[in-house]
Image: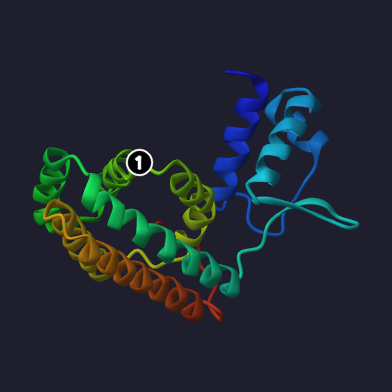
Amino acid sequence: MRASDTAYAVLRDDILHWKTPPGTVLAEVEQANRLSISRTPVREAFARLTAEGLLVALPGRGLVVSELSRDTIIELFELRIVLESEAARLVAHRRDLDTFTKLRDEFATASGLLERDDDRHAYYALVTRLDAAMDDAVQSHFLLNAIRQLRPHLVRARRLARDNRERLLAAAGEHLTIVDAIVGGDARLAADATAVHLKKSLKNILESMDSTIDSPRTPHHS
């Protein structure tokens, strides 16, 4: 792997998982020393992160990790609801039936993966496989690119949500409704169920943010 790719992967992971929080200034020399590489690959990594919107240039400060305000999160989800609802509608027409039938069967028993905290990684892996299946089935290059551009910011936003079993159980049920609609070829239900799921996810994130205004805490995955 090229040094610039390594630098990009490390810096991006730090930003997405809040190891480098919003507002942090990133300097070439400091990061080059930290990663034991020259400044050129760090500069290339910075350019890629800036293109993704994870870094922004501020007068007098240089490159800083972009902020993730309440208003920004709402705007992200407004666009996400439009894009992913349309993607679900298309997938309901274009899906591989066998793939989504298997996913439906797994989501039908997903609550069992949430019984214990240390089993939740299996549930997250299931959701990741659903996302991958949706990407493969949507068959819309421009729509998929637009969704992928949002994902880094959404990863950061989800880290603000409370990782509670009740919400995860509800989300598992919402995913099941989406997948079941796709299996049945019901495009309208797939789109509507996706919009409902995303609106509830946004509500959970905002409630978590509001509840921690006076009591800062370490973000969790949700």
Count of numbered labels shown in the rendering: 1
Which quadrant of the view contains residue 205? bottom left
Name the residue: 30% across, 68% down: 197
Q: Nearer the viewer, residue 61 or 175?
A: 175
Q: Quadrant of the N terminus?
A: top right
Q: Is residue 215 left or right of residue 4?
A: left
Q: Is residue 135 left or right of residue 103?
A: right
Q: Quadrant of the C terminus?
A: bottom left
Residue 151 to residue 209: above or below: above
Residue at the limit of the structure toward the top, as seen here:
1
At numbered mark 1, what does the secondary structure look like: helix, strand or loop? loop
Crowding at mark 1 (Cα within 10 Å: few <14, some 14-19, many 20+): some
Q: Which of 126 and 134 is in front in this view?
A: 134
Task: Tell me where residue 184 appears, x and y as whole percent.
Answer: 11, 55
Name the residue: 24% across, 45% down: 94
Task: Tell me where residue 155 appears, x and y as whole percent.
Answer: 47, 53
Which quadrant of the view contains residue 59? bottom right
Residue 157 to residue 48: above or below: below
Q: Which of 128 and 187 is in front in this view?
A: 187
Q: Which amino acid does label 1 sit on?
A: Gln
Q: Can residue 155 be seen in this view?
A: yes
Q: Can residue 119 be seen in this view?
A: no
Q: In this view, does 192 lie to the left or right of 199?
A: left
Name the residue: 18% across, 54% down: 182
Q: What residue is shown with label 1?
A: 139
Task: Tell me where residue 56 appears, x and y as whole percent.
Answer: 74, 53
Task: Tell me where residue 6 appears, x and y as whole percent.
Answer: 60, 27
Residue 103 to residue 79: above or below: above
